[in-house]
Image (cartoon, rainbow, N blue to C red):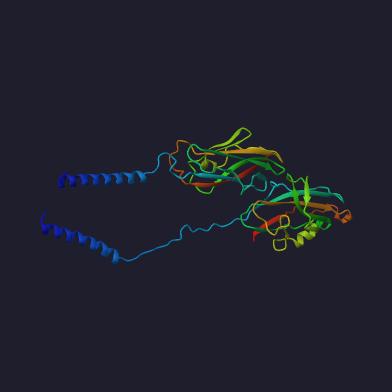
Amino acid sequence: MRTSTKVLLTALCVGALGSLAAMGVFGAFSSTTTNAGNTITAGTVAIADNDAGAAMYSIAGAKPGESVSKCIKVTYTGSLDADVRIYTGSTIGSLGQYVDLTITPGTQTTSTFPSCTGFTADPGGAIYTGTLQNFGSTKNSYANGVVDYPGSGTKWATNESVVYQVTASLQSSAPDAAQGLTTGAHTFTWEARNQ
Amino acid sequence: MNASVADRFTRAIGAAIGLGLVAALIVAARPAGGHGGVLPASLRFTAELDGAVMVEPAAPRPLLASGSMRPGNHASGAMTITNQTGETLAVRLRAKPSSTALDGTAQVRLTSGGRVLADGTLQALRQGTAEAIRLQPGGSAPVRVLAWIPAEVETGYEGRQVAVALEPVEETLP
């Protein structure tokens, strides 16, 4: 190989390497950062009971002093912590003024609606005591409903439950005027709202 | 040894070293054979309760946590369901997977007292078990869950993690 050729090839190599170096020197610097996978999923509020659509009580021909006591288990399955209030949206018939109602929260080893076998009341006792008529007129919406939480807590969390013993008694002092009257069908509502 | 022979010898050695390096790089970059070189799948089953039916263990405690699962691996778990109502119930279980990632790949079999309630893909279990469990008021029944990825599966499971909630669906019987 002639010296001139060697010189030429060397110059070409130096030129090529120089060009690469120049690209690196004069190229623009760049950098990015990303925040991926953003998503929002709404929580849930869900409450259910174990009545399978059946009423707690239905008494025909009730006599003064007659009482019925039934238990219903209410379970919260929503994902959001919630408040639960108990009320009725029903209009109570005229017998309601002679019917005493007691609602007592507690626990039960094994719940089978509407049995109260094995029911143990919470230490705080009843959360409502009064006539059915009074319940219907003062606890008739979420806003004025009876507030209750599992145990001594201040919220309902997922899968927490409370067994409510509902006792309704026709007052032994019910007057003759109460004969033939009725409370009408009434519904107890447990409504949950997230905190 | 004259200069040209030494030159050729050096070039041959250099070429051999270069080829060896290339071959080593290719071998190192090649994925491992079988299923050992890919991430495993995992399945986690929980059971949801509702007002009518009590389940144990209830979500968020899992009744089945498969850990690393590859084709041919099985995982099993069990739960108990109890009818809390005063009615006789027919209870079916419906799967609510967190994603469709293993829908067609994972197989699930649910049994109760030796009776097969469902046996098929995770996707099929979204429709609920074919058979129902009959529960008297206050009655309980055990349910066993077996999940696996068939040994013949080659792909479609890698690194996929799915949480499956089993939801009871009840029907009141006369």
Look at 46% across and 58% down and name the residue there: A36
Estimate the x, y position of residue A175 in percent, counting from the top left.
89, 56
Q: Nearer the viewer, residue B5 or B82?
A: B5
Q: Nearer the viewer, residue A176 or A106?
A: A106
In this rendering, does residue A56 appear at all? no
Q: Is residue B112 left or right of residue B158?
A: right
Look at 72% across and 63% down and name the residue there: A144
| Quarter location, residue A137 | bottom right
Q: Nearer the viewer, residue B41 or B28?
A: B28
Q: Quadrant of the C terminus of chain A?
A: bottom right
| Quarter location, residue B55 | top right
Estimate the x, y position of residue A55 in percent, counting from the top left.
73, 48
Q: Is residue A14 left or right of residue B97?
A: left
Total number of numbered discs in the rendering: 0
Farthest front residue in view: B1
In this rendering, does residue B64 appear at all? yes
Estimate the x, y position of residue B77 in percent, counting from the top left.
59, 40
Estimate the x, y position of residue A159 in percent, counting from the top left.
65, 51
